[in-house]
């Protein structure tokens, strides 16, 4: 079925397929990236706290180094700056978060761009298809055989459909990936709050 659609779609169909392949590659790469970057922040923080309670700073930093993701990097920075006071620690963590969030959002705008231009590319293919139809009518008149007109109609419909078929999943994929980014950012905020509280507040007396 796809080879038949490609044949009828013409050059614009090939361009749409390239754009669609780029969108798929971006989505898969971001999915794998977020899978690596997102951890169970609660378990991680509890583990680091238990180590710090034994005053084993080196082991706590080693745990952070061995753990992927921005949460671990935030916690490590807080530990390294633990003697600077609550406000300064928060400022350091805010600066790190400002660096981490753009990294999480990398390539997401590309999905939005593809979602916007794919229907326009499909529309251009549609226009080219109807140009083919009118060229046949100009040469053959109203008695033009249907098989000659069908090629242009095919091109018009196939390109419109492909443009929409690319755009809709891109919009859905972007929304899903953005929700993953928000989840990681929330984990970062929770971890930052917990580690700052632990490092700056005196332990409760039992």
Image (cartoon, grey):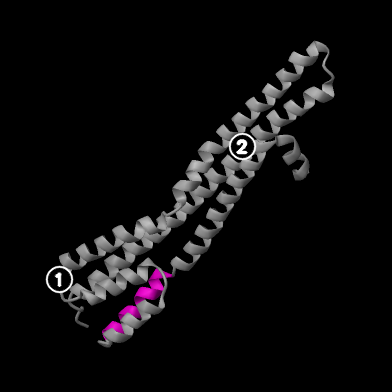
- Which is more toward the observer, 167 or 75? 167
Residue 92 in view = yes
Residue on which the image places disc 2: 163
x, y percentage for residue 150? Answer: 79, 26
Residue 120 in which image quadrant: top right
Q: Position of residue 64 (x, y in %)?
A: 35, 77
Q: In the shown orientation, is residue 156 left or right of residue 51? A: right
Q: CA distance from mark 2 to mark 1?
A: 55 Å
**Does residue 179 appear left or right of residue 141 in this picture?**
left
Q: Element type at marker 1?
A: loop
Q: Is residue 50 visible?
A: no
At 68% across and 23% down in the image, what residue appears?
130
The structure residue drawn at horizontal position 41% and vertical position 54%, both measured from the top left corner, is 105
Q: Which mark is residue 70?
A: none
Residue matched to label 1: 85
Residue found at the far front of this picture: 139
The reply, left or right, for residue 132 in relation to residue 62 is right
Picture coordinates of residue 49, whole percent (x, y)? 31, 79
**Position of residue 185 measured from the top left corner of the image (x, y, whole percent):** 37, 59
Q: Quadrant of the C terminus?
A: bottom left
- In-front residue for pair 144/205: 144
Q: Nearer the viewer, residue 108 or 7?
A: 7
Quarter holding the N terminus? top right
Q: Residues within 10 Å of mark 2 (few under 14, many from 20)?
A: many
Q: Nearer the viewer, residue 42 or 105?
A: 105
Q: Is residue 177 above or below residue 168?
A: below
Q: Residues within 10 Å of mark 1 (few under 14, many from 20)?
A: few
| Most frequent secondary structure within the magenta stretch | helix
Considering every residue shown, the one lying at the far top of the view is 142
77 is within the stretch colored magenta: no
Looking at the rendering, the stretch of residues picked out in magenta corresponds to 40-53
Looking at the rendered structure, the number of numbered marks drawn on it comes to: 2
């Amino acid at each position: 079925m796809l080879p038949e659609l490609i044949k009828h779609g013409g050059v614009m169909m090939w361009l749409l397929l390239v754009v669609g392949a780029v969108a798929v590659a971006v989505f898969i790469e971001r999915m794998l990236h977020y899978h690596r970057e997102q951890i169970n922040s609660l378990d991680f923080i509890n583990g680091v706290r238990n180590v710090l309670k034994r005053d084993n700073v080196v082991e706590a930093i080693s745990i952070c180094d061995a753990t992927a993701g921005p949460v671990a990097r935030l916690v490590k920075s807080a530990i390294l700056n633990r003697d600077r006071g609550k406000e300064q620690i928060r400022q350091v963590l805010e600066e790190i978060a400002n660096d981490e969030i753009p990294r999480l959002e990398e390539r997401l705008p590309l999905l939005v761009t593809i979602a916007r231009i794919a229907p326009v590319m499909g529309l251009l293919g549609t226009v080219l298809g109807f140009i083919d139809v009118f060229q046949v009518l100009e040469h053959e008149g109203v008695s033009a055989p249907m098989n000659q007109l069908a090629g242009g109609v095919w091109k018009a419909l196939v390109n419109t459909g492909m443009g929409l078929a690319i755009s809709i999943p891109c919009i859905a994929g972007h929304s899903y990936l953005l929700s993953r980014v928000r989840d990681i950012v929330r984990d970062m905020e929770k971890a930052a709050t917990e580690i700052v509280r632990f490092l700056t507040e005196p332990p409760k007396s039992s």
